[in-house]
Image: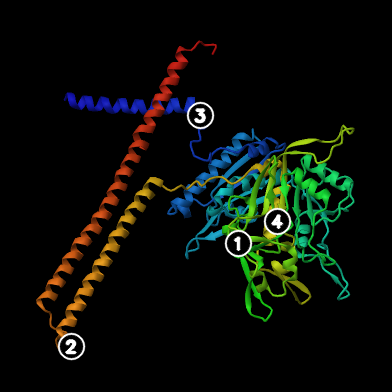
């Protein structure tokens, strides 16, 4: 009887303890957020916080996720919870300026029509017609709409950037203004050889459709503050006043993307010698901590195959096809790109005296070297370039971000308005201009009077990604790649890998024993003579028996290895469950009780 009473009292005490813990937890930690993930996945970066604090008029965010159709997709549901938690973090920092709506667009409902109306992508999940919505729509006070059509788990690193970009666009809905200084005919022109007008480059046409472009004279003496980004393509002989204007624009917070090429193949007229940046531009580059060697990159690891002098296929060491493995995956500029083509590219280096941060975007393989541009120009057959090829083993950068502290390249002692130093500039230098030309990334055909473009490389996407990133605020540029939410159990993987190595070693031993036994059988059969091949001698019978015994022993060893692997993982799982179920709640209870005791003992004024 007493035991039953004690059991009932124990259950009552546990229930009271559980309720007390939840009450204390909700009262003391209702607004407390603790992010224990390695990369701070649930904590906004400083750039995102600054973007949210700049919201002047309320915006609406509509997060659409199909709950019912994903009940058997736990990994996707976990990622959806990750997205939701991040959106709630934005809302918490916005001080009432973000209205977050969580919507489950069930089939044939008004919510589904709303998701489709915003342009969200519906992904079919089954033959029965089930569709998945997993995206974000946003609106501002003037009904401007922005959407993330679908949250792709493989792009999780850039989740925060995409959300911050959407919010930035809603806060500043007007298309950014891009000032363009170009020494190449990207706007088109007149072809003196064919006596025909030349259309603008396709990449310039795409830029003009997405942004407000403003062509600037190379003799410009000032750059207006309403220009969000300065785009420079192979500038020629800039005057001191123009260089000063560029210097001051960058130092007062303007963003710059510079394309400069040691051998621009589409320059007009064609250059009789390699392009050499004038001393003024070199002066600017030096102040930014950048050096552009007057050499062309030869890269056998990324060389594309072209037609040789006799029509035979040959790898052209100066025409490169860069794939994902030589792009910096953690940078938003290269995300989603599969192939970027370059031709007679140069390289970007950081100077020894640099005070800036140098972050490569595109890199060569280690099977590369630099070559004098005259040798590249004079080579009539691409195969000739291989005769002088001697790789250095060094990895070169063809494009790099430049940020950080910069001093002015000019000394204007008597000018009080002159900016002498900036704490953080935003510059992107790409040592190739040919990647902008149509021939390296797109085919253009005429179809009933209409132009049909067929891209075969991601050159335009690279440029648009860079423009999107740099036309945002400095806060948006600072939002970089974050870690993965879905993390593997490293200890478990190490256990599994070690066991598999043991398994492979045992399997190898088995194969060697089988080979030896088979050799012995062959030798014994040869000794019996051709007429008695089907008769087994006592020695052969013994060998067969030994072989079968060995197979049984080794199979048992394999089972033991697998069994031990499962046992190690099971023990680890038990330990993890114990920590999650017992240890962590116990620690939380201890902290809560300590805080409660501290509050009781503290004076009321504290």
Which label's residue is closer to the chain start, 3 or 4?
Answer: 3
What whole-number distance in Å separates the C-alpha atoms at marks 4 and 1? 33 Å
Estimate how packed mark 1 is, as few (under 14), some (14 to 19) or many (20 or more) residues with alpha carbons within 10 Å: some
The tag on residue 30 is 3
* Rendering coords of residue 120 (x, y %): 61, 55
561 vs 20, left or right, is left
Tell me the tag on residue 530: 2
Q: Nearer the viewer, mark 3 or mark 4?
A: 4
> CB atoms at circles 2 and 3 under 8 Å apart?
no
Image quarter (top left, top right, bottom left or bottom right) of the C terminus: top right
Q: Nearer the viewer, residue 366 or 88?
A: 366
- Judge depth for marks 1 and 2 and give the one in front: 1
Image location of residue 231, percent across then percent down: 78, 52
For the point 85% across and 36% down, which residue is it? 418
Mark 4, residue position: 464
Determine whether label 2 and label 4 are within 8 Å by CB. no
Q: Quadrant of residue 407?
A: top right
What count of labels does the image hold?
4
Helix, strand or loop under label 2: helix
Question: In the rendered structure, which disc, 2 or 3, sits on the residue that comes first in sequence?
Answer: 3
| Contact check, label 1 and label 2, Cβ < 8 Å | no
In the depicted structure, whether residue 9 falls above or below residue 527: above
- Residue at 60%, 53% in the rendered image: 328
Establish if 233 lies above or below 79: below
State which tag comes first along the sequence, 4 or 1.
1
């Amino acid at each position: 009887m007493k035991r039953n009473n004690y059991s009932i009292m124990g259950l009552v005490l546990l229930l009271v303890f559980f309720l007390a813990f939840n009450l204390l937890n909700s009262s003391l930690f209702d607004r407390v957020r603790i992010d224990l993930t390695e990369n701070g996945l649930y904590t906004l970066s400083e750039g995102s916080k600054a973007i949210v604090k700049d919201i002047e008029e309320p915006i609406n965010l509509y997060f659409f996720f199909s709950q019912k159709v994903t009940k058997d997709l736990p990994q996707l549901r976990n990622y959806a919870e990750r997205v939701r938690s991040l959106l709630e973090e934005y809302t918490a920092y916005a001080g009432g300026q973000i209205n977050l709506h969580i919507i489950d667009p069930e089939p044939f409902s008004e919510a589904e029509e709303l998701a489709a109306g915003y342009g969200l992508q519906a992904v079919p999940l089954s033959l029965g017609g089930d569709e998945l919505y997993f995206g974000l729509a946003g609106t501002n006070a003037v009904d401007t709409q922005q959407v993330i059509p679908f949250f792709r788990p493989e792009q999780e690193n850039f989740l925060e950037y995409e959300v911050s970009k959407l919010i930035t666009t809603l806060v500043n809905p007007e298309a950014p203004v891009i000032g363009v200084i170009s020494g190449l005919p990207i706007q088109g022109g007149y072809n003196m050889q064919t006596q025909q007008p030349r259309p603008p480059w396709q990449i310039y046409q795409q830029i003009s459709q997405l942004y407000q472009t403003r062509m600037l004279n190379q003799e410009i003496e000032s750059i207006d503050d309403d220009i969000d980004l300065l785009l420079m393509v192979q500038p020629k002989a800039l005057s001191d006043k123009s260089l000063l204007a560029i210097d001051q624009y960058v130092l007062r917070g303007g963003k710059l993307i510079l394309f400069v090429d040691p051998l621009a193949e589409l320059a007009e007229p064609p250059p009789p010698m390699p392009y050499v940046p004038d001393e003024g531009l070199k002066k600017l580059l030096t102040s930014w901590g950048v050096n552009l060697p007057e050499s062309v990159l030869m890269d056998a690891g990324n060389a594309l195959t072209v037609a040789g002098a006799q029509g035979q296929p040959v790898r052209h060491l100066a025409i490169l096809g860069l794939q994902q493995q030589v792009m910096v995956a953690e940078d938003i500029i290269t995300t989603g790109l599969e192939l970027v083509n370059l031709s007679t590219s140069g390289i970007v280096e950081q100077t020894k005296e640099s005070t800036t941060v140098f972050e490569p975007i595109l890199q060569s393989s280690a099977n590369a070297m630099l070559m004098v541009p005259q040798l590249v120009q004079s080579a009539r057959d691409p195969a000739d370039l291989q005769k002088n090829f001697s790789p250095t083993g060094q990895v070169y950068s063809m494009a790099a971000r430049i940020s950080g502290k910069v001093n002015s390249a000019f000394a204007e002692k008597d000018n009080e308005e002159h900016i002498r130093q900036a704490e953080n500039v935003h510059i992107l230098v790409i040592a190739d201009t040919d990647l902008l030309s149509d021939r390296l990334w797109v085919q253009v055909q005429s179809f009933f009077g209409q132009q049909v473009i067929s891209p075969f490389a991601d050159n335009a996407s690279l440029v648009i990604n860079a423009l999107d990133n740099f036309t945002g605020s400095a806060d948006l540029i600072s939002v970089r790649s974050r870690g993965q939410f879905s993390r593997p159990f490293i200890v478990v993987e190490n256990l599994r890998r070690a066991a598999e190595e043991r398994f492979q070693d045992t399997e190898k031993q088995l194969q060697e024993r089988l080979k030896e036994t088979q050799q012995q059988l062959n030798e014994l059969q040869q000794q019996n003579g051709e007429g008695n091949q089907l008769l087994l001698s006592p020695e052969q019978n013994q060998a067969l028996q030994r072989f079968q015994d060995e197979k049984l022993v080794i199979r048992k060893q394999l089972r033991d290895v697998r069994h031990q692997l499962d046992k190690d993982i099971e023990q680890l799982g038990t330990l993890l469950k114990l920590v999650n179920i017992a240890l962590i709640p116990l620690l939380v209870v201890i902290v809560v009780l300590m805080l409660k005791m501290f509050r009781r003992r503290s004076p009321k004024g504290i």
